[in-house]
Amino acid sequence: MPWDEWEQLKAEAAKGRSPHMRLNQLAADSGGGGGASRQGDLTVHQTDLAAVGSAAYDLFNQFTTFSTHARVASMTAAGGLTTQGFALGAALDHVAERWIDQSQTLLDACAQISNHLRYTRDRHAADEHYVAGTLSSIHQLDQGFDHRKGA
């Protein structure tokens, strides 16, 4: 708050007028908290997390099956070509080895997505529990103050 605005509010208060002042919050119509529909609020829906987790799980399982088939077929072909004296056998074996490395990287990424989603779900639940406990404590304090005031 600028100094001149502060001085103006003090002068209005001295005249008996009720100054309107907001501290540490935004105007109700300009954003901020107050509802899940406002843009910028953090929302996590179990269905969204479940869809991403399911896709990662399906990719992991299907890719494991298909990449194993491709690896075995490539290694078999490489071995056959090498046995028959073709230099292409060694090159195909090199490609199959790289395929194994790249496949494992993708599978690790899928597992990391799954682990992160599980962590996100658990962390969100813990945050909800903390916020609910904090708000409950504030409500109990308010009731205590109201009781003492005779309200």
Image (cartoon, helix red, strand yellow):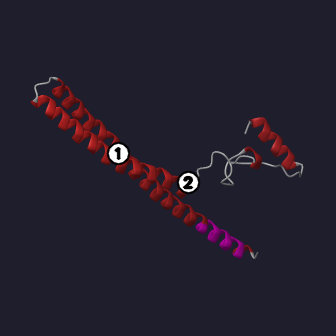
- Main secondary structure type of the part rendered in magenta: helix
Q: Amino acid at mark 1?
A: Phe
Name the residue that disc number 1 marks.
Answer: 63
Residue 117, percent from left and from top: 44, 52
For image coordinates 74% across by 73% down, the residue present is: 149
| Residue 99 as seen in the image, left or right of residue 133 | left
5 and 54: which is toward the camera:
54
| Residue 88 as seen in the image, left or right of residue 36 | left
For image coordinates 25% across by 38% down, the residue present is: 100
31 and 96: which is toward the camera:
96
| Residue extending furthest toward the front | 84
For image coordinates 50% across by 57% down, the residue present is: 124
- Callout 1 environment at 10 Å: few (<14), some (14 to 19), or many (20+)? some
Please tell me whether residue 100 is drawn above or below residue 49 in the rendered image.
above
Label 1, label 2: how far apart the Cα atoms are: 28 Å
Residue 8, percent from left and from top: 83, 40
Q: Cβ–Cβ below 8 Å for labels 1 and 2? A: no
| Residue 1 as seen in the image, left or right of residue 9 | left
Displayed quadrant of residue 142: bottom right
Asked if residue 5 is among those painted magenta in the image, a careful observer would answer no
74 and 124: which is toward the camera:
74
Find the magenta span and give its range: 136-147
Q: Secondary structure at mark 2?
A: loop
The image quadrant where one finds the C terminus is bottom right
Please tell me whether residue 144 is drawn above or below residue 6 in the rendered image.
below
For image coordinates 23% across by 39% down, the residue present is: 73
Q: Amino acid at mark 2?
A: Val
Asked if residue 141 is among those painted magenta in the image, a careful observer would answer yes
Residue 137, percent from left and from top: 59, 68
Displayed quadrant of residue 105: top left
Name the residue that disc number 2 marks.
Answer: 44
